[in-house]
Amino acid sequence: MLTSNIETLPGYRITQHLGLVEGSTVRAKNVGRDILSSIKNLFGGELESYTDLMREARAEAETRMLEAAKQLGANAVINIRFSTTSIADGASEVLAYGTAVVVE
């Protein structure tokens, strides 16, 4: 599956627009990560456990979006975007969305 964050795929011609596709996941922080991150937060620096959590969430959302595109018969998704929303204290949704297309 080809992907792009722009409206075209250089070197390919879009022959069909199949519509909007999306994938999402909701992830919550866990106590172990919170304790370690609180300590790290005192001294500054990257909160690596949260970075990993968000990376995993983006990957899951993207995988679900690509599966939705595949079900429509797409071989590419263009104009991909990610959005993050706080759902509840300590839980966030990561949404991946784009336009499913057929290219040749």
Image (tube, rainbow, N blue to C red):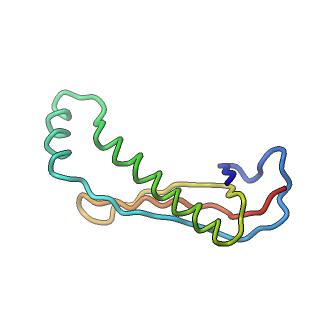
Relative to 38, say whether 54 is above or below: below
Q: Which residue is pictured at 64% across the width and 66% down the height?
A: 69
Q: Position of residue 67 (x, y in %)?
A: 57, 64
Q: Position of residue 54 (x, y in %)?
A: 38, 48
Q: Is residue 55 left or right of residue 2?
A: left
Choose top left, top right, bottom left or bottom right for residue 18: bottom right
The one nearer the camera, 44 or 15, is 15
The one nearer the camera, 90 or 71, is 71
Q: Position of residue 59 (x, y in %)?
A: 47, 51
Numbered marks: total:
0
Q: Is residue 30 left or right of residue 72?
A: left
Choose top left, top right, bottom left or bottom right for residue 60: bottom left
Relative to 52, say whether 85 is above or below: below
Q: Position of residue 6 (x, y in %)?
A: 70, 49
Q: Which residue is pictured at 83% across the width and 59% down the height?
A: 14
Q: Is residue 64 left or right of residue 100?
A: left
Choose top left, top right, bottom left or bottom right for residue 75: bottom right
Q: Which residue is pictured at 32% across the width and 65% down the height?
A: 87
Q: Quadrant of the N terminus?
A: bottom right
Q: Which residue is pictured at 84% across the width and 55% down the height?
A: 104
Q: Is residue 75 left or right of residue 59?
A: right
Relative to 29, say whether 18 is above or below: below
